[in-house]
Amino acid sequence: MITAKPTWVDDIQGLFAAPFWLPPEDRAKVGQGWLGCMRGYLIDLADYDSVREWSVTIYDHLISRSMPLTDDTRQFWPLDALETFRLWVNQGWRRDAHAPFDEAPRIPKPAVPRGKLRMRRDLAAMSAAEIDDFRARLDDVMDIGNPAPTAPWQKWAYIHTNWCLHYQEAFALWHRAYLVYLENLLGCAIPYWDFMAADASKPDSPQAGLPQAFLDETYVHPGTRETRPNPLRFAAAKDGQSKYCAATGKRGGDCLYVHRDPLFYTRGDDHRAERARLFAMAGLFQQQVVDALAFDTFSVPQGSPGFPWANIPAFTPPQPDKDYPYRDQNFDGAFEQPHDNYHGWIGPDMADNAYTAFDPVFISYHANIDRMLERWIRSHPVAQYSVGVPLRPFVGQDAAVINERTSELWRYTTLGDMAQDSRHIGYDYGPPAAPQFKGAQHSGGRGAVAAAAGATHAAWVIFDGVRCTHDSYAIDVFLGGEAGQAGAENPAYVGRFSRIGMGIQDDKGRCIRHGVSRMLDAAPAARALGLPTGSDPGLAIRVTHLHENREVTPDEYRTLPGFVPFFHWGDARCAPIDKGAPGQCCSA
């Protein structure tokens, strides 16, 4: 609460010594930390004269969040504390209630942020009327049920079919521009589907499976009061034929609309066991997201073959680039794996890059993918990116228009435009309605999971040479030499690496020519099986063609890029590559 007539004795001193917005048990300790830190800058926050002398500078640093010097955002001053401090300065730094006022505009009112941010809200926190309003916009603005090539929904979704980027630094940021462009068309924020809810893998939880907003058959249009097909379910598929029908040869009926795994529509005892197995997989994908968020580096630089000079610790003696693999130990390389897994999990239209954007699940799913990206960006404000990379076909700093024909790269929205705090771009996220999945901190990033990266007990399944494929596959990985049941209940199960196919021939250079590395953390399975470090774990995989619903033979998947993994104990950077060349930490 703002104090209208603050004094040093009654109000200001306590803001520094025992900040009221922190838990009571933390206030004195944090306050003492601030005092000790700022004395090193010759500012004594416990001394009236010192704070008065430096008050304007102190306020500037507090409101800009360059002070206090902390990585804990909870310690930043809230608006009511800042405004109390500003009033104290402008009223003449009154020491106590008996001191006279000396009012002067020493610190102006904080500037009002430019424009109003669009607020992307959790679907689970929205009212039925608010969801129906969003549905109506999809109907009225995007004509989402119309398969004609001139329909706005078909034209928007085809941008993804023709231009999406994967297996590279621009992956998550291209999709950020894609959603921003849609919001400009709709004139509203896209709600997000919180697949990171803590109970999302529990079959009887309301957070499990797809949100009900995508399962309802009808809704009432708020403008006309007509009962209409739910556009979040009955959206026209690519060219009016779903991927399921294109793959199976089915015709007529509901082939016009996008398809998903039918288990999402079951309830009660109907296919209960199969549904429980499907939903349980979400917990494995959530853990992959948590692991990805722990990395401190964003990506291998765009255009690099994967071995940037910045990651070479020494140049004596000079060594060839191939001896210094980066191994894609970064956020976006790890994050793209659960991203692909969710696409395949929802299937079948979502499991093909040529079809996926036609399913409206895509937009709320990717809004939550972007929410996780935003968490990483805000916690790494000095991260480095290849800022000049064009994100075609979006044009301008805010991705407001598209141009699929110009060769002038400077016109396009860039990776750097989108690699900023989302509030700079024009939108923010509302809080999730449910508690969030925290997961186990055991994998190979940095920060909370850093220790495992170089530890001898770390274990990895590594896929090298990963590139785009035409079709979509799920690769389930097991230790022990036998491909058993996929799922967390199987201690030998390492996890899933989905490969979401492009669906069409790439004629725009969207797919990288060199392969990238992708890794699965095998340490939990190795521990569960009691495998001694350095032993042969007996690696096994099962490859499933997602649209033909068949197991792929070894002779077939060995011809595909990056489908045959190998196992490695210890630091993944030490794993052999390029016909046995050692990693940077193993060459000595």
Image (spheres, rainbow, N blue to C red):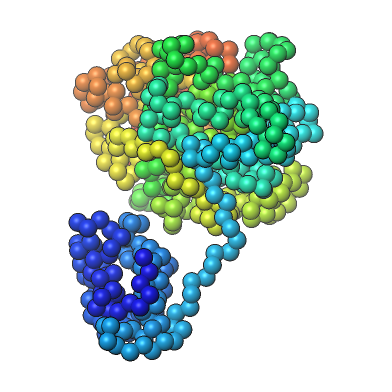
Is residue 516 shown above or below 408?
above
> Can residue 417 be seen in this snapshot?
yes
Residue placed furthest toward the front: 225
Residue 285 location (% of width, % of height): 42, 29
Q: Residue at 60%, 61% (x, y): give it.
A: 115
Residue 353: quadrant of the picture: top right
Is residue 370 shown above or below 457?
below
Residue 162 location (% of width, % of height): 69, 34
Residue 163 location (% of width, % of height): 66, 37
Q: How many marks?
A: 0
Toward the viewer: 468 or 164?
Answer: 164
Q: Residue at 61%, 43% (x, y): give it.
A: 179
**Seen in the image, is 495 located left or right of residue 187?**
left
* Quadrant containing the C terminus in the rendered view: top left
Residue 134 location (% of width, % of height): 62, 39
Q: Residue at 73%, 23% (x, y): give it.
A: 240
Residue 579: quadrant of the picture: top left
Q: Residue at 61%, 20% (x, y): give it.
A: 259
Toward the viewer: 395 or 466?
Answer: 395
* Quadrant containing the N terminus in the rendered view: bottom left
> Can residue 392 be seen in this snapshot?
no
Is residue 167 shown above or below 316?
above
Residue 102: quadrant of the picture: bottom left
**Seen in the image, is 475 located left or right of residue 444?**
right
